[in-house]
Amino acid sequence: MTAAAEAGRATRGLPSWRATLVGGDDRRLVTDLVALAIAMVVVRLLATFLLGSAFNAWPARIGWDMHLVDLPAVRAQPMSSLLHLHSQPPLYTVVCAIASGLPSWLATTLLYLGSVGLGVLAAGATYLAARGLGVRRWLSLAVVILGVVLSPAWLLWASIAFYPYPTACLVSLSVLAVLRLAERRTIGWGLVLAGLLAGLVLLDSLYQLPWMLAVLALVVVVARVPWRTVLLCSAVPLVLVVGWTAKNMVLFGVPSTSSWVGINLSKTALAGLSSADVAQLVADGTLSPLAEHPGFRPLDTYPVGVVARPGRTGVAVLDEPRKSNGQVNLNALGYVGISKDLLGQDLKAIAARPGHYAADVGRAGVIWFSPSDDNVLFRRGTVEGTGPAAAAYAAWLSEHATLSPAMARYRDAYDTVVGLAPDGRMGTSWASVTLRPGSRPRGVSLTSVAACGLFLVGVPIVAWRRRRDRTTATVLAYVWGTVAMVAVTSTLLELGENDRFRFMTGTLVLLGATVVIDALLSALAGRRRMAIPPGSGPEASH
């Protein structure tokens, strides 16, 4: 029987909060959790105040992010605005709309404390999940400290009021919820898991309704949690997710939480083709003129006759081409038709130029292994736009930097020593990829390559060998399946921020690779014991 199964049996009937939350009555688990929480808070404070990594709350405060609609319009007409939100899931918009209505100091304080709290929970959940899966205590602590607490990626993404960080935290928390539900089969943990799954679907478009249904089915079929319990716990979360997806389908003909699939795919299928090649494909009728305008761009930059111009609906988030802060409104109704039309052009371009698409998918796959602390958001020093909001944001950026000089030095040292990413920042660029000809090379983390390799191959093997332990098998299937889903869909659909997508799988790769390493250590220890001849051990001398 594995440690996970033993823990599940040992804690049944224990009334203490440690048995319910921590998964055992071992006081060392509580001590370790407290130590990790303190370390997470202290390191975050050091990054902010000692390394000068400023907390950037401006995207939420003024809505300066392409993923957001006009926040004043949402506050003025919340129900209508959210009903007509098609570009992105609603949760990030709701949080930012609330934050933007608060005094700036209060919004910044709450967002900062929220990010610190989420980080503490994610680190603790990862440690408890590792211990619940039988990983050695020292290895569990070492991996969480090195891979989460001290990680510059976790520090930098936590320093921007943007949805990737809460996504990573919620994913990390969901692993513990799967583990506890499989062990204890209680309504409480069922509610936690269903809430986390729904939160992810309503926060990040990488996670969709089929994924949520697959996870719920997994805990029923593999962990044998009673289906009535799962249905009861997930009823309200499923109504929310199904309702939002159905709303998008009915109003906009989009069967997902985001209408941007065609536009995102065009950055891979069309953007890298030469203008002469695209013009030739348009001339011979393979593609339409819209193919010459891939990616995101203001509606008024499309030539007349290339895209449809919908009439006004009376809803600001659909009608206005720009938000009140001067930024382009990518939720305008015209983008729904543009994305649908571009999706058709994308598929035709892939059929006509499969080699180009395969090469771009390969680049996306390589960028997946780049350090996720090397995102353009951390290097941003200018803001496009001439309005008052753009000027205010640009002034703030000129005085503050999320990637401060001291933080950049720490990041470079960590990525070189721990991440093994000799990408030209502190070493020779011998393992890198360029997004486009002439663009900045992106270094590859050899540690990420090794961890993902262990994860890809090792997790299914460990899950199969421990298949009699339904808890472990369920958790490993969830971890592996979720990472595979995100990796495949994001790599096939978008080229550019694939390192961010890997970060948004939270600690799943880290946890899975750690389980594999622990299994290898156990196998080596077993072989050593078998290699000792009978009677030759220390007890033979007595």
Image (cartoon, helix red, strand yellow):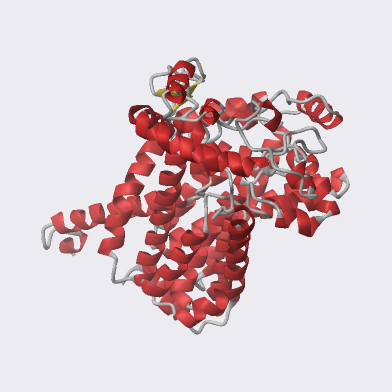
Measured as percent of width and height from the top left, residue 277 is found at 43, 19
Front-lying residue, 223 or 4: 223
Q: Quadrant of the N terminus?
A: bottom left
Front-lying residue, 284 or 290: 284
- Picture mark count: 0
Residue 436, placed above or below residue 342: above
Extreme residue in the bottom direction: 13
Residue 236, placed above or below residue 92: below
Residue at 33% x, 48% y is 456
Extreme residue in the right direction: 103
Residue at 33% x, 28% y is 355
Residue 57, placed above or below residue 242: above
Measured as percent of width and height from the top left, residue 305 is found at 62, 30
Residue 61, placed above or below residue 401: below
Measured as percent of width and height from the top left, residue 388 is found at 86, 29
Which of the 4 image quarters holds residue 462? bottom left
Residue 70 in view here: yes
Q: Is residue 443 left or right of residue 168?
A: left
Residue at 29% x, 67% y is 467
Q: Is residue 121 left or right of residue 458?
A: right
Residue 365 in view here: no
Measured as percent of width and height from the top left, residue 494 is found at 49, 37
Q: Quadrant of the C terminus?
A: bottom left
